Each structure stands twice: as C-alpha cells, then as structure tokens.
C-alpha cells in the first residue's frame, strides 16, 4: 500500500458525460501527479500540482482539467467524454518535488 | 515522440534464471531513472532507481546498470521467481521543478515455475 488513495475504483459512463476522479496524496506529500494508462499510449503524464499550484503540464486534453485543494487532495475532471478516454487514471504523490513518486491504485474509466 | 525506448516487450524466463530488461533515452536533461513494477489491477510500484553519476545499483535480487555515454540503462533480476511475474516499466525524470515521469512502453515478464 503506497498511502495514496483514489476514488472511485471503477467508473462507467457514457460519451459526452463529465466525471471527477479524486486523489488523496500520502501524508506530508505536497506534489500530486496525474497519469493516464491506456493500451495504445502506455503510461502518459498529464499534469503536476505542487502545494496547490500547477507545476507542469503534459499530454492533457483541453477537455480535461485538474486542481489541488488546500488540504492537498486533487481532482481530475474529464468532460465531453469520448470512447478513447477509456483508460486507467493514476494519481501519484511525492514529498515536495522529490524524485520518488508513489502511485495510487488507479481509477478504471470506461466510456460506453 | 517516445523519449524512453524499452525492450523486450515480453520476456519468459525459467525460475532461478536472470531477467534482463533494457532501456534507452534521448533527453540529456533526465537525471533520475526509476524502475516500476506493476501487477494486474494495481498501480505501478517503485522498485529501484539510479542517478546518472552511478554506474550500478543493487538492491537484493534487483540491479540497475547505467551507461551514461550510451544513454542506456537496464534492469537485471537475479534468481527470478514466479512472484516476479509482472509488467516492468523503466522511466526517466528531468532535472528542474517539473517532475513528470516519462515511461518506457513496458515489459511483461513471466517467470515459469
């Protein structure tokens, strides 16, 4: 158990809908990262937050957004969902901007 | 553009054998190279990592070999066990405040009993 929690574990929704994925980092970790894992694209970095501020952006679609709240939990919002958004979404955290990133168990999103 | 290339895609070894997974990178801004192990239905778990100023790092049965001039690094799993059967990802982290991991494509390891 990495100490990073993610909810929900599974999410099934329809095209065009909007969903919110939630992540709680390890106690004391200030950085939160979101990654997408799909069969065709592998593990791809989406976005990083550090203590509430956006620090880095990767291959994140404009339909996707994220934020980190004062209690350091983070939410990833996915809107206007398409079939191709079906994937595993992982959250990771690290202490400050440390090298070691610890991953949560992931949220499996299925768009029908 | 794939910045970390990983091979092989799949690997089958006998129990007790040595598993070797290779990775190559292009971006010289990378300065931390972790390996992650992922079991089905689980998140990636940090296994072992190395910095480019070190040529080898060993933790138990797991060893990373690093060749800075060739921009290549590899994971060796000694005395491979069926419980090691998982997908292994190499990754690279750039220096600076943007700490996004770039992952290789993964290697599915199967250790036969």
Image: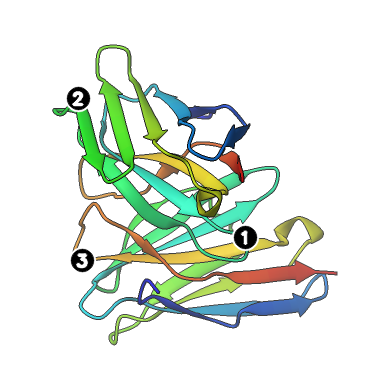
A77 over B94 or under it: above or below:
below
Q: Label 3 near label 2: C-beta < 8 Å?
A: no
**Label number found at residue B40:** 1
Q: Position of residue B100 (x, y in %)?
A: 36, 49
Q: Residues within 10 Å of mark 1 (few under 14, many from 20)?
A: few
Which residue position is annotated with label 2?
Answer: B55
Q: Residue furthest right?
A: A112
In the image, A104 versus B110, the foreground residue is: B110
Which numbered disc flags the more N-terminal residue, 2 or 1?
Answer: 1
Q: Is residue B28 visible?
A: yes
Q: Residue at x 39, y 32 (%)?
A: B76
Q: Residue at x 32, y 12 (%)?
A: B70
Q: Chain of mark 1?
A: B
Q: Is residue A80 visible?
A: no
* Image quadrant where residue B107 sits: top right
* Image quadrant where residue A8 sits: bottom right
Q: Label 1 near label 3: C-beta < 8 Å?
A: no
Q: Nearer the viewer, mark 3 or mark 1?
A: 1
A106 over B45 or under it: above or below:
below
The answer for how far apart the CA atoms under marks 2 and 3 are is 26 Å
The answer for how far apart the CA atoms under marks 3 and 1 are is 26 Å
Q: Residue furthest top?
A: B69
Which residue position is annotated with label 3?
Answer: A95
Q: Position of residue A32 (x, y in %)?
A: 35, 67
């Amino acid at each position: 158990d990495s100490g990073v929690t993610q909810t929900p574990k599974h999410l099934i929704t329809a095209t065009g809908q909007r969903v919110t994925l939630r992540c709680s980092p390890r106690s004391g970790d200030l950085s939160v990262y979101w990654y997408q894992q799909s069969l065709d694209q592998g593990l791809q970095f989406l976005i990083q937050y550090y203590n509430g501020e956006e620090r880095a952006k990767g291959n994140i679609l404009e339909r996707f957004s994220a934020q980190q709240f004062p209690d350091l939990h983070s939410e990833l919002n996915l809107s206007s969902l398409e079939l191709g958004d079906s994937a595993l979404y992982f959250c990771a955290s690290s202490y400050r901007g440390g090298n070691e990133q610890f991953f949560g168990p992931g949220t499996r999103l299925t768009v029908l | 553009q794939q910045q970390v290339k990983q091979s092989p895609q799949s690997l089958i070894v006998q129990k007790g054998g040595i598993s070797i997974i290779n990775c190559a990178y292009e971006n010289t801004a990378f300065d931390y190279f972790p390996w992650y192990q992922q079991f089905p239905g689980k998140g990636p778990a940090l296994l072992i990592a190395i910095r480019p100023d070190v040529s080898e790092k060993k933790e138990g049965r797991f060893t990373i070999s690093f060749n800075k001039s060739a921009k290549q690094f590899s994971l060796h799993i000694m005395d491979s066990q069926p419980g090691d059967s998982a997908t292994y990802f190499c990754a690279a982290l750039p220096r600076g405040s943007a700490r996004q991991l770039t992952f290789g494509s993964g290697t599915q390891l199967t250790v036969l009993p």
